[in-house]
């Protein structure tokens, strides 16, 4: 194999190694050690200066106790389940809201599309943190929404949305909606309009043409959008900690507590490793789907 | 859009160039609590010493401790609370202060030094910056509307009696998100030793906290300043100076919210925030200059006048504003001080139990 070819093939693997595998093994190594009052707050630390003996000592000190610990307390699996539920429901809502938006964008005339696209991208010009914070101003008891409801007489008491799981759903759907809209729009925009005409010529109603032609053709966009929303929502920390209440159990918050309140880096790392495994399954499914799609296209 | 992006990139580059050229000048990096200094003091320090000051803020001891234990934080001066300081000293996170470089140390208040020696024997690693109490902040109008004129505003019963909390939930209650503050308070309410270090006694705090947790809108350690000032909540269990800052913000906004701070009559936690220099501080001599600057009587007074916390600087007291030195919520009288208690750090095992208890209280899981 010539060196150039080797370079082209090797580059993605190098990328994977540097940005995924190396960080993963660092976290895994911490997950297998014990806490200590020191800097950094865990032992054993791999001592490379001691050579082979150091590596052997390092192996001798490792154990799976932190992973076992995760199975002993109901908090962890409840937090994982609750995160899965919040991520799944948010993804479905984002799909229900995002699909019509993407569809309308794809149907719009050519001169309107860049403007509509711009409007979807525009929120990214503001910091994510500021956008989440601004929801406090909308949802709080004295916020815009409640002031409007009270003023208009639609409600006589302020709605308690802020600091509840509902606020977390609103925050996640709002934040990740563009990630749902853009891939679906990309799929719909590519679609050949004459296919719909053909379906209608062959006796399909507009609605059945949508179900039989448009929806299946936009499937890759829908799948990509769902993964792009589901995966970051699962490990979300910022949105539940800003908008959620203390009853909103999410694994991102549990991880923070282990790391900061308990100073237990090993258990925090074990939580992170399990979370990563939970994420890797959908990512692999996603990759498989992509690959199949590419092969089908060829 | 493309043009804008280029402009933005150019600006970033320019900032980097400025930062790089300034790197030659001496720099001190300070990591302090949010809303905890009169910012004009920072400019004064730069003008007096010619040292560039980088000032960052945090709102929880846990966050600071994680940075200290990770090492290489890059900060020269940090401000942990006594209990946390003690553990970080034992982890080797701080260096001993070279007191020859601190001529203003003569201003220090011996009564406070005697108390901080509990966490830092001989005060070898740290100097007191501010001290205060943890107590009850109320929106007077709203609380009286809900509980009547004789509401027990100066008692822990206001926040630990479910009958009161059930009514207060309607107008909003915030608690500090700090088990090391809430568990001692709950134990004090029960008449137990607030500084208990055994799992059995600590467990007694759990039913008290669990009973009132459903009525707490949020457990958070800095949001209550604004929430109280805006009238979003009517009660906060928080730090003295923060609640007094909320009082002033509400008065400035003139929104009708009248805020008061009360030290509970059962007793309150007295805590000490200490200036310390990390072991791996890039500029320890600059750090000493900053600490010496803060130890100056007029500077310490300016900080206290701004943040409404008492300081550990005896000489500063003649420069304190009347509404600071004369306010018993900030400088409590002797009878109140006698009623204040301090706590010690939990060991690792107990700390995990305490965090777990706290998660159970907050989330019900």
Image (spheres, coloured by chain):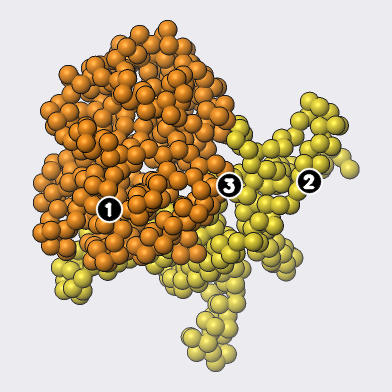
Q: Residue at x 52, y 38 (%)?
A: B66
Which of label 2 and label 1 is nearer to you? Answer: 1
Find residue A243 and report its horizontal and vertical position in percent.
38, 57
Tag shown at residue B349: 3
Q: Is residue A241 left or right of residue B226?
A: right
What SS does tag 2 mark?
helix
Which of label 2 and label 3 is nearer to you? Answer: 3
What SS does tag 1 mark?
loop
Tag shown at residue B156: 1
Q: Residue at x 43, y 71 (%)?
A: A97
Which chain is depicted orange? B
Q: Colour of chain A?
A: yellow
Q: Residues within 10 Å of mark 3 (few under 14, many from 20)?
A: few
Q: Residue at x 15, y 68 (%)?
A: A151
Q: As rendered, which of B7 and A124 lies closer to the eye?
A: A124
Find residue A17 and report its horizontal and vertical position in percent.
73, 43
Q: Residues within 10 Å of mark 1 (few under 14, many from 20)?
A: many
Q: Residue at x 68, y 43 (%)?
A: A34
Tag shown at residue A207: none
Residue A224 position by quadrant: bottom right
Which chain is disc 1 placed on?
A: B
Q: Which residue is mark 2?
A: A9
Distance between the Cα atoms at labels 3 and 1? 28 Å
Q: Is any part of residue A277 visible from this angle?
A: yes
Residue B239 position by quadrant: top left
Find residue B142 and report its horizontal and vertical position in percent.
15, 58
What SS does tag 3 mark?
helix
Which chain is disc 3 placed on?
A: B
Distance between the Cα atoms at labels 2 and 1? 68 Å
The mark that comes first in sequence, 3 or 1, is 1
Q: Is residue A123 above or below residue B308?
A: below
Q: Is residue A89 above or below residue B76?
A: below
């Amino acid at each position: 194999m010539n060196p150039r070819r080797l370079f082209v093939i090797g580059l993605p693997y190098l990328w994977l190694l540097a940005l995924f595998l190396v960080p993963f093994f660092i976290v895994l190594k911490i997950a297998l050690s014990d806490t200590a009052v020191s800097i950094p707050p865990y032992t054993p630390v791999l001592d490379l200066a001691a050579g082979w003996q150091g590596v052997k000592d390092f192996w001798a000190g490792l154990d799976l106790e932190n992973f076992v610990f995760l199975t002993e307390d109901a908090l962890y699996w409840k937090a994982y389940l609750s995160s899965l539920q919040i991520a799944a429901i948010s993804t479905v809502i984002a799909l229900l809201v995002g699909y019509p938006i993407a569809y309308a964008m794809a149907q719009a005339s050519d001169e309107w599309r860049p403007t509509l696209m711009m409007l979807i991208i525009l929120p990214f010009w503001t910091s994510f943190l500021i956008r989440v914070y601004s929801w406090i101003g909308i949802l709080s008891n004295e916020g815009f929404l409640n002031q409007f409801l009270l003023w208009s007489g639609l409600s006589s008491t302020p709605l308690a949305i802020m600091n509840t799981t509902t606020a977390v759903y609103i925050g996640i759907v709002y934040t990740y909606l563009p990630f749902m809209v853009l891939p679906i729009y990309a799929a719909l925009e590519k679609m050949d309009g004459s296919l719909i005409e053909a379906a209608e010529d062959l006796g399909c109603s507009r609605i059945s043409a949508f179900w039989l032609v448009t929806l299946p053709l936009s499937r890759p966009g829908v799948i990509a959008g769902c993964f792009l929303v589901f995966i970051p929502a699962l490990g979300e920390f910022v949105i539940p900690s800003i908008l959620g209440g203390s009853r909103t159990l999410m694994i991102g918050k549990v991880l923070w507590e282990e790391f900061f309140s308990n100073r237990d880096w090993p258990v925090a790392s074990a939580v992170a490793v399990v979370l990563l495994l939970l994420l890797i399954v959908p990512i692999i499914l996603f990759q498989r789907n992509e690959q199949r799609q590419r092969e089908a296209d060829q | 859009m493309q043009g804008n992006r280029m402009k933005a990139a150019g600006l970033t580059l320019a900032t980097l160039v400025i930062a790089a050229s300034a790197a030659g000048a001496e720099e001190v990096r300070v990591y302090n609590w949010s809303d905890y200094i009169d910012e004009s003091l920072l400019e004064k320090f730069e003008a007096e010493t010619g040292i560039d000051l980088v000032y960052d803020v945090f709102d929880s001891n846990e966050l600071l401790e994680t940075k200290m234990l990770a090492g290489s934080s890059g900060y020269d001066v940090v401000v942990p609370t006594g209990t946390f300081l003690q553990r970080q000293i034992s982890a080797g996170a701080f260096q001993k202060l070279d007191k020859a470089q601190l001529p203003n140390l003569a201003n220090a208040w011996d009564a406070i030094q005697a108390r901080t020696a509990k966490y830092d024997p001989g005060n070898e690693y740290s100097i007191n910056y501010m001290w205060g109490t943890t107590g009850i902040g109320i929106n007077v109008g709203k609380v009286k509307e809900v509980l009547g004129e004789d509401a027990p505003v100066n008692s822990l019963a206001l926040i630990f009696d479910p009958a009161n909390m059930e009514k207060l939930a309607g107008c909003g209650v915030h608690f500090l998100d700090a088990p090391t503050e809430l568990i001692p308070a709950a134990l004090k309410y029960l008449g137990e030793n607030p500084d208990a270090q055994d799992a059995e006694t600590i467990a007694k705090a759990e039913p008290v906290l669990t009973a009132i947790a459903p009525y707490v809108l949020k457990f958070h350690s800095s949001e209550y300043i604004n929430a109280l000032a805006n009238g979003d909540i009517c009660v906060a269990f928080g730090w003295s100076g923060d609640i007094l800052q909320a009082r002033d913000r509400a008065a400035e906004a003139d929104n009708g919210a009248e805020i008061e701070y009360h030290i509970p009559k059962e007793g309150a936690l007295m805590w000490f925030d200490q200036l310390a220099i990390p072991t791996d501080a890039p500029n320890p001599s600059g750090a000493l200059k900053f600490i010496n600057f803060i130890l100056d009587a007029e500077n310490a007074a300016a900080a206290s006048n701004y943040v409404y916390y008492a300081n550990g600087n005896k000489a500063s007291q003649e420069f304190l504003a009347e509404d600071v030195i004369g306010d018993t919520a900030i400088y409590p009288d002797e009878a109140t001080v006698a009623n204040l208690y301090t706590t010690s750090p939990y060991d690792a095992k107990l700390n995990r139990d305490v965090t777990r208890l706290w998660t159970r209280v907050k989330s019900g899981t």
